[in-house]
Amino acid sequence: MPTLQILNYELRHFNMHTKPLMEEYLREVNVDLSDYTFAANYLWLSSASGFYSIINDTFCLFIMQGSEISMLLPPLGKKDKINDAIVECFKIMNENNTSKYYSRIDYVHEKILECFTNYLEEGTVMFEMLADYIVEKKLVDYVYKSEDLIELKGNNYHSKRNEINKFKKAYSDVCVETLEPSKHTNMINALYRKWTSDRVKYMPKEEEDRFLEGILFEQNAIKRLLAHYEELELTGICLFIGGELKGFTVGEKINEHIASIIIEKTDFETLGCAQFLFREFSKVLKDKYEVEYINVGDDMGFENLKKVKMSYRPEKLIAKYTIYQK
């Protein structure tokens, strides 16, 4: 894919070869958001074109949709370099885009936001930053203590323990395997098709259109995940009942004390399957990466997903912001 030349900057195609370079700059930022890994961005860019450039010694990741570009992440690098890089990135976007409306920086962590301004009014959804910018609080990542998800102690987790116990009593032929793309790809694709069909049946009508819009996007991400599984340094497990795949999940290490779950799908009609798989994978992530916390990402704005993630009593919610230019 050709590069883009905007102002005096060359924007190069974002691909697997970009991994070591991006990870070098990610180490300078070191935040706990699930979006701040190479794999997270590479997978979800499967349906769009990604470009990157080194601007003011920061790694800047752009996404092109149609002819308009925005940023998937803020500039990544040393704290004293980020402010000037943000200003330059808006110049690049504005030069390319048909309107400033399309120019924005998504998934900004508070730590990086503080590099851009000293003003942050806690608890507000939208507030003014400087004369030319607006920041909007978007979704939050749900972060849990690994031990909480594994042990499920206390009254708060009573219903989760019950679901798992019922599942174990109902199915004696349960088997958990380490995910191997060469062995499991066809079964995973078949389960995903079933999950999509079942999910639509039970989904609130007001969420259905938005859900369906994201299906192709997620399908492409799963295909890319399975195609580059080892290169992306991912880990995952598959859950079988009577030899039939009923669930799979994949995650990765974000940094030395937190891992993330990138995707999890289970047979919607096998009760207790999701709770059982979630706990088993929490064990895998803690044992493999020796992490204290597990990040399960955001709820994408779906109320039912929010309820599920809140039901596991997150230890903390990490806000994500978008920067716009007026």
Image (spheres, rainbow, N blue to C red):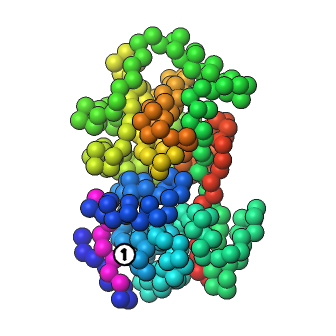
User: For residue 179, which quarter of the picture?
Assistant: top left
User: For residue 49, which quarter of the picture?
Assistant: bottom left
Q: Is residue 148 above or below residue 163?
A: below
Q: Residue at x 53, y 66 (%)?
A: 106
**Residue 45, image x and y in percent?**
38, 59
Residue nearer the viewer, 19 or 246: 19
**Residue 249, image x and y in percent?**
43, 36
**Residue 293, image x and y in percent?**
56, 42
Q: Is residue 12 magenta?
A: yes
User: Considering the image in quadrants, where does the C terminus appear?
Assistant: bottom right
Q: Is residue 117 above or below residue 318?
A: below
User: Considering the image in quadrants, where does the N terminus appear?
Assistant: bottom left
Q: Residue at x 41, y 12 (%)?
A: 173
Q: Is residue 25 above or below residue 230?
A: below
Q: Is residue 220 magenta?
A: no
Name the residue beneath numbered marker 1: 53
Residues in magenta? Answer: 9-16
Q: Residue at x 35, y 89 (%)?
A: 8
Q: Residue at x 54, y 23 (%)?
A: 271
Total marks shown come to 1
**Residue 303, image x and y in percent?**
65, 46
